[in-house]
Amino acid sequence: MNHRNYDAKRDNPAIHRLWREIGWLSEDDLKLVGLGLKGVNATVAELDGEVESLAMSNICNMKYVNQSVKFSAVSAVCTSMIARQQSFAARLTALRLAQDAQAGAEFAGLGVFDQGFYDRLGFGTGSYENILRVTPSSFKVTVKPGQPVRLFPKDWKKIHNSRIKRLKTHGAIDLHPSHTRFELLLDKDSCGYGYLNKKGELTHHFVFEKKFNYKDPTRIKWMCYRNRDQLIELLALIKSFGDQVRAVEFQEPPLIQMQDFISRPFWYQTITEKSRYENSMRVYAYWQVRILNLAKCIEKTRLRHGDLAFNLELSDPIEDILKKEKSSWKGVAGNYTVTLGKNSKLKTRTTRNLPCLKASVGAFSRLWLGVGSATSLATSDDLKAPATLLEELDHALCLPKPHLDWDF
């Protein structure tokens, strides 16, 4: 496999062919390929002189409790039909991660087509996301919403600024402006509604996947707000559509239990069962994450209580993929001493008489981010430690449930 950095003038025709072949984009959507690749880092692989695989990422910020972590968002990995089963996707993704790590990225994430493939690159499964389908008129909100403004793809700058300034919880990321523009233009029927402040700034809004109608459930692609009152107003606005819109579908906002806002949820679920407008809650864990810079991630861990020290024996499968590559970054496997506290730190050696935690980078990444507790991961993932250390880690790393809160 020959690989190199993506070159727009040279590679766009081949990228068009690639995406057309795998069916990801329609003919009209292919016109947006250049925009989709704007502001991202991309690597291509050639077979017999033709580009047959692509991996692209964007380095952005992720909120880790009250810290900011440099996050590599791997937004697309695709391979043509004639280059399948030749490890192109795995090798290109590994190279993309290595380049991002060398450029300062500390943590990485991606969406998965199914669980398992990216485990070989050290990724661990992220949090469950709840997808809610509900009858808008069932919302238990009593405030009267203000008059909103209409939003269209041409308003992408205002919309992106609103997304960047949204209320962020643990795990939230911010992506490049071109990503917002690409998402809006990709769905030509997308529209939204929101509210402006006195300065004309869009403060809170939501965007529909397509123009709603009374015949089909309507999906809300995203919802942004800066405080509780703005969330309530958005829910009230959605409720006001209830005389025409039979069902809306959206991802449950981070750290909010939407059932608290629904009147008689089980009654509505029963009477709509097996209908086009069935009220339901589905759960998916469709994104995965991994650590790229262990020292930086540990340093950004701030605990309020006393120090907890342990040895860490970390394995990283990406090392086998990158061992023949020229990249200086080849993963984070090694033996370390970790001290967690108000000023956490990492030493690249073990310390005598300390308990030892043995883990894969995927399992440890899930622990560090707060996807699962040490005890639960010791049951379900590649993580082992004495029972006393597991219990201490459970108490020390008691983190909010992480949500990326921005699909890519």
Image (cartoon, rainbow, N blue to C red):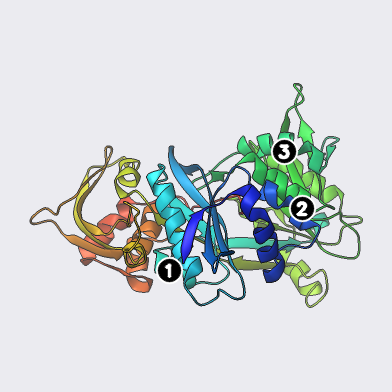
Looking at the rendering, which quadrant does residue 390 occupy? bottom left
Who is closer to the viewer here, 12 or 360? 12
How far apart, in angstroms, are the residues tagged by discs 3 and 1?
Answer: 34 Å
Q: Picture coordinates of residue 148 (x, y %)? A: 84, 37
Q: Nearer the viewer, mark 3 or mark 1?
A: 1
User: Label 1 amino acid?
Assistant: Asp
Q: Residue at x 56, y 41 (%)?
A: 168
Q: The C terminus lies in which quarter of the figure? A: bottom right
Within 10 Å of disc 2 (Cα), the crowding (few <14, some 14-19, many 20+) is few
Vertical comparison of 204 with 249: above or below: above
* For residue 110, side relative to residue 342 (left or right): right
Determine whether, in the image, residue 159 is placed left or right of residue 94. Answer: right
Mark 1: secondary structure: helix
**Residue marked by disc 1:** 119
Q: Nearer the viewer, mark 2 or mark 3?
A: 2
Q: Which mark is residue 387?
A: none
Q: Which residue is mark 2?
A: 31
Horizontal and vertical percent for residue 334? 23, 58
Residue 159 image label: 3
Disc 3 residue type? Answer: Ile
At x 13% / y 56%, what residue is drawn?
A: 354
Q: Nearer the viewer, mark 2 or mark 1?
A: 2
Q: Nearer the viewer, residue 402 or 359?
A: 359
User: Does residue 330 appear anywhere in the picture?
Assistant: yes
* Closer to the camera in the image, 332 or 304: 332
Q: Earlier in the sequence, mark 2 or mark 3?
A: 2
Give the Cα separation between the discs numbered 2 and 1.
33 Å
Instruction: Please give the name of the residue rendered at 91% of the width and 55% of the height, measured from the top-left corner.
Output: 243
Residue at 16% over, 59% down = 355
Looking at the rendered structure, the secondary structure element under dot 2 is helix
| Neighbourhood count class around disc 1 (C-alpha, 10 Å): few under 14, some 14–19, many 20 upward | some
